[in-house]
């Protein structure tokens, strides 16, 4: 018995219950997944591993009492995706949202389609399939009612959890129709009729309560760290402190004397690059977490640090800065930037630095696993359950269908929990314990010191201005170790997807633009982090725009808008050659008019140009990421001793149509606070190959007294006649440059290296 069996609101659905139905008379049938067919170039969810599914028989059940149950196969980590999915299906189904429940689907991409919850794709790529699921189920219910009444289906209509015969007023509830409807064929896509947006009852509406709000607020919700399996042991791991390090020798005698310690288990170090594999080390398995941690502290381990033992952040920054002063691999070349720079009336240059960052979710990684014979079962908070299934299937030579992953609520993810090394460790230890379930726990120190870190970056920019202060040339050199370093040996350049986050897709109307990518080898694990490489690129570019405005004696907002130029598709036919978050370039062009609109909206709402008290300043920044558009205006005050306060932040956002405004606003507010935290405090530094920070005393996060006093969100919502953009990540990139630009306006001090920390106090 697991704790998840006792909490229906977060219960995971087994393959058997999903196949046979969740309740008596349930509208769920066994369904054969057709094999994928060869098509032209795929985009969006269709291009993802596992693709998309829109068969209502996979995701919906309707019980005899009318309760509608929806399976959500995206991880819930605070973004409210369970609620948003229910809103979409309820609207098209004509269901009463109050009579719907949402259950978490287990990992199974063959059945449910792609389940990797990252890239701000959970609503962007599933809105249309969810509408098809709801519409198909509605039409099946309507067909069943019409058949029972012996009338044409055109005479009946689903309305608020019932099907009504309009002429006679006869009504049948969804529960009464479910069994018969389930036996009917699913309508073809081209036969589906969708609700007109003006008839939506839930989609786009405010104040829709979270479907799991009661469980979360009363402590009933089950997160990964809450999982309990009968008879389980607990474990922690002493991992190599340096990437590529190994155990040279270990003395476990004192650890085994700790009451409750059961076993010491070596975990082999992988070859580098190691992808998502555990780092290796020595595990301590015990009857409780306290004993495991105490036993680990008594291990006597001598480490072989390997080739990265000399990694030093101070020296590496110098190396990146030196590399950025030299030509690198050309990744964009419009016109002749070098010639235009040579002939410019004035040249402006600046270098910007962002250190490594750690995701540091409030709930550290944890997983509970049971490996017995030819079966493996895992309970954990994870963004990519199929990655766990694939790894464990290969690791233990178990058929994939025998590996079950229960995705529990995530206490934050930010990309860290898309890498399943912690689940692999739990399974390795259960196997070593003869099949006894084992809960593997990361302490906060484990999490911060053994993360897949956000990349470190130096961005060097140079521009040539004409006599009027207008740029005629733009040169950008970006130097940063790439995420692909965890997958392939020794790549030294950023990947196309990283360069497509602000560098090669720069939308400015400048005739001569050149972007180069000098080499930057990786010396620690680099991984996904909320907004990924948009963070350093937006910080550098938007900071540099403000510097150019100052050099030209211009207002920063007006100057930014002039650089963007007229409303247009910024790249025309070339757009297909530029990485675009996996989306169709025809559906998602780079529309400079939308970027302009969020800038004007944020500036207008913030009162750009208004008189400010002494020591106050406004800063602005804007960026397109995850096919959405964001602008931020920050107001800061720099007081005596360089004390920084943030009276107000305005953030304008255009993601196309908005499904759940409350959730969009909450994610934007969270992005602002996290952006402030990263800009003012965030830094992971390395010495002798080791992360120097261990907990929140060193890797600080913004506390409430340092957060913006006011955050104002402004949604530019469009009609539901175009594609949706991402939401979870695009709010973050413009925050840091808006903040540092405001600091310059308030104090005249230019911040080019993050975090800010005490730079204002020191006058650096």
Image (cartoon, grey):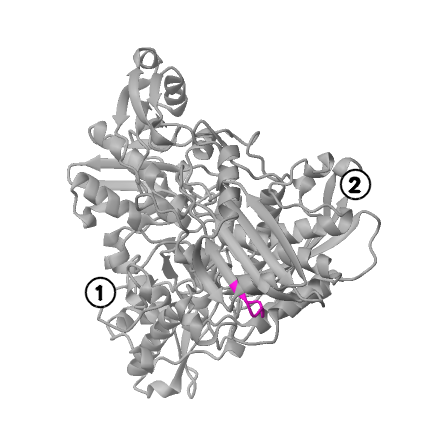
Which residue does the numbered mark 1 point to in the structure image? 33
Q: Is residue 287 magenta?
A: no
Query: x, y percentage for residue 684?
Result: 51, 36
- Give the number of the disc on residue 639: 2
Q: Residues within 10 Å of mark 2 (few under 14, many from 20)?
A: some
Quadrant showing the C terminus: top right
Report whether residue 487 is seen: yes
Q: Is residue 511 magenta?
A: yes
Comparing 70 with 528, the one in front is: 528
Q: Quadrant of residue 602?
A: bottom right
Comparing 429 with 473, the one in front is: 473
- Give the number of the disc on residue 252: none
Query: x, y percentage for residue 587?
Result: 44, 74
Q: Would residue 72 appear left or right of 550 to someone viewing this image?
A: left
- Relative to 149, residue 538 above or below: above
Q: Residues within 10 Å of mark 1 (few under 14, many from 20)?
A: few
């Amino acid at each position: 018995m697991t704790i998840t069996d006792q909490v229906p609101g977060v219960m995971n659905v087994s393959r058997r219950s999903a196949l046979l139905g969740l309740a008596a008379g349930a509208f769920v049938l066994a369904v054969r997944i057709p094999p994928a067919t060869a098509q032209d170039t795929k985009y969006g969810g269709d291009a993802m591993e596992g693709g998309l599914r829109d068969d209502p028989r996979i995701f919906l059940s309707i019980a005899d009492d009318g309760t509608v149950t929806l399976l959500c196969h995206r991880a819930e980590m605070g973004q409210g995706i369970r609620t948003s999915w229910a809103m979409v299906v309820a609207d098209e189904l004509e269901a009463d949202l109050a009579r719907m429940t949402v259950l978490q689907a287990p990992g199974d991409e063959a059945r449910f389609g792609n389940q990797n919850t990252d890239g701000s794709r959970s609503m962007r790529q599933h809105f249309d399939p969810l509408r098809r699921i709801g519409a198909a189920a509605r039409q099946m219910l309507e067909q069943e009612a019409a058949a029972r009444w012996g009338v044409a289906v055109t005479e009946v209509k689903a309305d608020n959890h019932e099907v009504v015969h309009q002429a006679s007023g006869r009504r049948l509830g969804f529960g009464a129709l479910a069994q018969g409807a389930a036996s009917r064929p699913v309508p073809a896509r081209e036969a589906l009729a969708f609700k007109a947006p003006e008839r939506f009852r839930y989609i786009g509406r405010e104040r829709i309560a979270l479907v799991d709000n009661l469980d979360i607020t009363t402590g009933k919700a089950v997160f990964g760290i809450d999982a309990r399996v009968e008879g389980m042991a607990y474990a922690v791991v002493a991992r190599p402190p340096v990437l590529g390090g190994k155990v040279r020798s270990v003395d476990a005698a004192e650890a085994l004397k700790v009451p409750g310690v059961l076993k010491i288990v070596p975990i082999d170090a992988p070859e580098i690059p190691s992808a998502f594999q555990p780092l290796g080390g020595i595990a301590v398995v015990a009857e409780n977490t306290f004993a495991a941690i105490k036993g680990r502290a008594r291990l006597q381990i001598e480490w072989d640090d390997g080739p990265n033992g000399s990694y030093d952040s101070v020296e590496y920054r110098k190396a990146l800065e030196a590399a950025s002063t030299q030509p690198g691999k050309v990744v964009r070349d419009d016109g002749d930037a070098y010639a235009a720079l040579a002939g410019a009336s004035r040249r402006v240059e600046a270098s910007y630095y962002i250190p490594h960052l750690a995701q540091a979710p409030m709930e550290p990684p944890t997983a509970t696993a049971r490996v017995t014979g030819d079966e493996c079962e895992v309970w954990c908070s994870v963004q990519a359950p199929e990655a766990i299934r694939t790894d464990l299937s290969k690791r233990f030579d178990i058929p994939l269908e025998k590996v079950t992953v229960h995705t529990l609520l995530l206490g934050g993810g930010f990309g860290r929990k898309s890498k399943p090394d912690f689940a692999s460790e739990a399974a390795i230890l259960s196997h070593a314990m003869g099949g006894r379930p084992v809960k593997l726990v990361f302490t906060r120190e484990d999490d911060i010191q053994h993360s897949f870190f956000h990349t470190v970056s130096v961005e060097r920019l140079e521009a040539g201005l004409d006599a009027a202060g207008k740029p005629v040339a733009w040169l950008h050199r970006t130097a940063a170790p790439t995420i692909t370093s965890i997958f392939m040996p020794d790549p030294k350049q950023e990947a196309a997807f990283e360069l497509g986050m602000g560098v090669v897709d720069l939308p400015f109307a400048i005739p001569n633009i050149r972007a180069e990518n000098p080499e930057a080898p990786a010396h620690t694990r680099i991984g996904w982090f909320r907004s990924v490489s948009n963070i350093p690129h937006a910080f550098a570019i938007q900071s540099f725009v403000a510097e150019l405005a100052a050099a030209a004696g211009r207002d920063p907002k007006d100057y930014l808008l002039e650089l963007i130029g007229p409303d247009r598709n910024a790249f025309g036919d070339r757009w297909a050659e530029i990485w675009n978050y996996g989306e169709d370039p025809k559906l998602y062009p780079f529309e400079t008019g939308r970027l302009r609109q969020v800038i004007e909206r944020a500036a207008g709402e913030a009162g750009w140009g208004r008189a400010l008290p002494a020591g106050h300043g406004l800063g602005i920044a804007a960026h397109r990421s995850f096919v959405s558009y964001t602008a931020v205006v920050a107001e800061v005050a720099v007081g005596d001793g360089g004390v920084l306060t943030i009276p107000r932040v305005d953030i304008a956002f255009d993601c196309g149509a908005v499904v759940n405004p409350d959730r969009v606003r909450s994610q934007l507010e969270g992005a602002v606070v996290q952006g402030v935290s990263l800009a003012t405090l965030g830094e992971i530094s390395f010495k002798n190959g080791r992360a120097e920070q261990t907990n929140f005393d060193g890797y600080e996060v913004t506390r409430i007294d340092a957060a913006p006093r006011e955050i104002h969100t402004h949604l530019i919502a469009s009609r539901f006649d175009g594609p949706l953009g991402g939401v979870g990540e695009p709010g973050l990139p413009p925050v840091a440059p808006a903040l540092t630009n405001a600091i310059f306006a308030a104090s005249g001090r230019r911040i080019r290296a993050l975090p800010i920390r005490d730079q204002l106090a020191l006058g650096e």
